[in-house]
Amino acid sequence: MTNIRNVDLNLLAVFDALFDERSVTRAADRLAVTQPTVSGLLKRLRRTFVDKLFVRTSHGILPTPRAEALAGPIKDLLANARALVKPQAFDPAAAETTITLCGSDYLQHAVMSPLIEEIRKLAPKIKVSITPRPAAGVADLLARGEIDLCISAREVALPDLPSRRLYHDRYICVARKKHPLKTQRISVKQLCAFDHLLVAPTGGSFSGPIDDMLASLGHHRRVAIAVPTFHILFDILDSDDFIAFVPERLLRKRRSDLRVFETNVAMPAIEVVANWHPRVSGDAQHKWLRELLVKVVRAP
């Protein structure tokens, strides 16, 4: 046996069955083939190893010394081969790795923060890195494994990569508790009478989806201050009689501290999705992460 390319590795499973069963008939049953098939494969084995390997007796077949020497290494080789094709397992409790998540300020608060809480419970040795979504190059970062998951609104998601819809959110109109408007429902005219706050993650913009919606109705609001994050927005909101529209998920821990208004305006919906690279679609760790993410965002 001088060239491994000339060896049919399937023959090793036949050798293993013959060695264990000491019977061509029982080996055939174990391999789910016919007895003549096993006899033909045994001839090929003998040519491959240049040895009789098994000799017939009145009680079955017995291995030759060469077969005895081959049995252990072949069994180890088959076990390693089965391990290679066995579905990959992932044990979160023992895992020591780093997960990188990418998303906007809103999604860092609404999605990644509760996700990290669950990761800490189930996989305390895993490190988590959160990065803001870059203006470009997200697909390349996912391809290189520098980002594991990118979470974003549908309109800026990556249509050519695998994705999963996570949830729908909506904008809610809020102000500080001391705001002079005391009614639960306000008109568009009242809405536009006060200065507004807006989150513009990349800076330089005083307009967003709410402004597009108001413009379609023939109205205009004055955005007095644009900030990069919702954290800053909530701080400033408490300082004066501003009005702001924020995703409802951000109010889960803040609703009692704010005045929430209903309006006569149909708010644009927010659909949130997760993107990843197809090379990790079947990876056990990544599948666990995606399933945990869905469980977290859909929890009541």
Image (cartoon, rainbow, N blue to C red):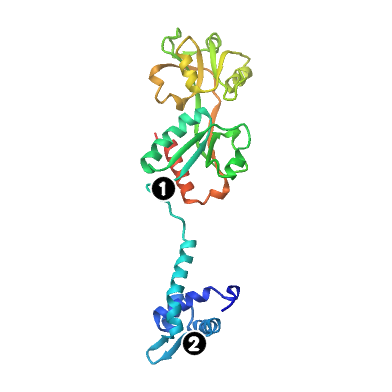
Q: Is residue 13 above or below residue 206?
A: below
Tag of residue 273: none
Do the CB atoms of the residues marked 1 and 2 lie less than 8 Å apart?
no
State the SS at label 2.
loop
Q: State the quadrant of the N terminus.
A: bottom right
From the viewer's side, name the closer residue of 90 and 193: 90
* Numbered circles on residues, count: 2
Residue at 52% across, 40% down: 149
Q: Position of residue 103 (x, y in %)?
A: 53, 33
- Residue 169 visible: no
From the viewer's side, name the closer residue of 31 and 265: 31
Q: Position of residue 216 (x, y in %)?
A: 63, 19
Q: Which residue is mark 1?
A: 95
Q: Is residue 195 above or below residue 11?
A: above
Hey, what amino acid is under mark 1?
Answer: Ala
- Residue 98 visible: yes
Residue at 43% across, 90% down: 56
Hey, what amino acid is under mark 2?
Answer: Lys
Instruction: Give how far apart the Cα atoms at labels 1 and 2 are.
Output: 48 Å
Q: Which residue is mark 2?
A: 52
Residue at 43% across, 24% down: 251
| Outermost bottom residue | 58
Q: Position of residue 173 (x, y in %)?
A: 49, 18
From the viewer's side, name the closer residue of 250 and 227: 227
State the SS at label 1.
loop
Q: State the quadrant of the C terminus.
A: top left
Q: Position of residue 176 (x, y in %)?
A: 44, 13
From the viewer's side, name the closer residue of 50 and 119: 50
